[in-house]
Amino acid sequence: MIVIALNYCSINAQLYFDAEDATLNQNGDLNDNDHLFKAQLQGDDIEIPSFINFARAGDKAIKYHIDGTKSDSKQRVEQVIVHWKNPEKIKDKSKRYTGFSLYLPKEWKAPNSWYVIYQVQQAATSRAQKGNFPFIGIYMNDFDATLSIRSGKNGNTQRNPSPKGTNVDTETLKRGVWYDFVVGYRFSPYTNDGWVFCWIKEAGQSEYRQYGSKDIKVGYYEPDTEILTTKVGIYRGADKNPTTVYFDEVRYADVFSKARIPEETSPIPIATPKPTPRPNNNLAYGKPAFQSSVY
């Protein structure tokens, strides 16, 4: 994959990492395709990312593991695709796609608090904003993967109330199965012509199933138009249970075809699931909308 070589990753071309020819340092930072994908760690009983001899494609994948917290603190172990020290400038109406393969091992348990496997945050003007709510995220609620979408003035927790949004239920995931995800969005913080979609399929399936919402605002209008960070991994509230997930084939691009797992696949619409209110995400909930074309 041809990308621009930087210490911290920002997109000028496709970004891609997996475990095949990558290296990990003592901090969990992953080096692949001449890019350094920083690890972000928080809380107690955190393990740095590691490689396992099990994969969606090839021979190895990346393992993210957290032991149960002893201090009732938030915990995270994430790999940063776009880094806050070199945020990507994004224009109004631009499109971005993140693809990844996710595996919940047999011992994975439903979380007792909020649990995020993917998130996109937007930079404040100062780039020093703390507690930045992601404007797009995928939360695990029990075994359900839920797509969250936020918009408004900004994502700062100092703002009261916190930014509201829409939750779209996607699929109930099974343990012991590789799932291919593509999350795409049209950035539109000012007008209701943005969209966010999540395409999902099991490894070996030929077509993606599509979930999401269109004709909406996407992103915050107060910060400058930069993406503070895009991450995959685990970020969760206090939970006494250990947890592990595997990621493979992580991609970031401005077109769908470069973010999907490289095989003949296409998204299709499916029946609308019933949206269910969730207590942990601080969100308002809306009915998902579907389109059969690739955005």
Image (cartoon, rainbow, N blue to C red):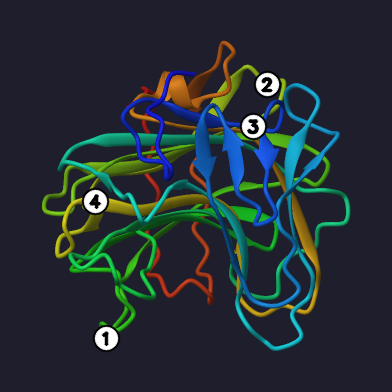
Residue depicted at x 83% and y 33%: 54
Q: Nearer the viewer, mark 2 or mark 3?
A: 3
Of the residues under marks 4 and 2, which one precedes in the sequence?
2
Residue 270 can be seen in this image: no
Q: Amino acid at mark 4?
A: Glu
User: Is the Cβ of the residue at disc 4 closer than 8 Å to that at disc 1?
Assistant: no
Give how far across and how far down residue 50 sits, in percent.
Answer: 76, 48
Query: Considering only vertical position in the picture, is 279 above or below 253?
Result: below
User: Is the Cβ of the residue at disc 2 closer than 8 Å to that at disc 1?
Assistant: no
The secondary element bearing badge 3 is classed as loop
Q: Amino acid at mark 2?
A: Gln
Q: What residue sits right under mark 3 in the picture?
A: 18
**Residue 205: which numbered mark, if any?**
2
Q: Nearer the viewer, mark 4 or mark 1?
A: 4
Q: CA distance from mark 1 to mark 3?
A: 39 Å
Q: Nearer the viewer, residue 2 or 209?
A: 2
Of the residues under marks 2 and 3, which one precedes in the sequence?
3
Report crowding for label 4: few under 14, some 14 to 19, many 20 or more residues within 10 A (C-alpha).
Answer: some
Using residue 15 as the reference point, say whether residue 117 is left or right of it: right
Using residue 185 as the reference point, say whether residue 239 is left or right of it: right
